[in-house]
Image (cartoon, rainbow, N blue to C red):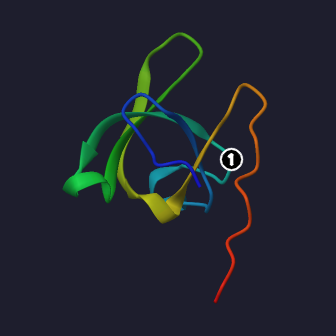
Amino acid sequence: MKKIELFDVVAVIHDLPEHNLWRGQVGTVVEVLSNGDAFEVEFSDRDGRTYESLGFRASQLMVLHYKPMQKPPASTSE
């Protein structure tokens, strides 16, 4: 799994009704926190106006990719 970095485009993987954010909504990482364990993600409308900015753990996000990727080789347990 790709490490989440500043300016990555990410999607929320669980509904957060208290913030009016729903699974699949797309945002941009605008700050990396806690040595890469947490992230501030900004959600904007089509006109570029921010409607929510919220902190997330990596386990709550999925990085979106815009080009083909190679699957990493399977690890072997010995």
Residue 4 sits above or below residue 65 on the image: below
Q: Position of residue 29 (x, y in %)?
A: 40, 36
Q: Position of residue 35 (x, y in %)?
A: 22, 54
Give the farthest residue toward the bottom.
78
The amino acid beneath tag 1 is: Gly
**Figure quadrant of residue 14:** bottom right
Give the farthest residue toward the top.
47
* Residue 10 falls left or right of residue 53: right
Quadrant holding the N terminus = bottom right
**Relative to the observer, which residue lies in front, 78 or 20?**
78
Quadrant holding the C terminus = bottom right
**Figure quadrant of residue 65:** top right
Q: Position of residue 55 (x, y in %)?
A: 33, 52
**Figure quadrant of residue 32:** top left
Residue at position x 64%, y 38% from top?
A: 64
SS label for mark 1 = loop
**Relative to the observer, which residue lies in front, 63 or 73?**
73
Residue at position x 68%, y 47% from top?
A: 24
Q: Position of residue 26 (x, y in %)?
A: 59, 36
Residue pointed to by mark 1? 24
Density class for disc 1 (Cα within 10 Å; few <14, some 14-19, many ≥20) is some
Residue at position x 55%, y 40% from top?
A: 10
Residue 42 sits above or below residue 35 on the image: above
**Relative to the observer, which residue lies in front, 8 or 14?**
8
* Residue 16 falls left or right of residue 75: left
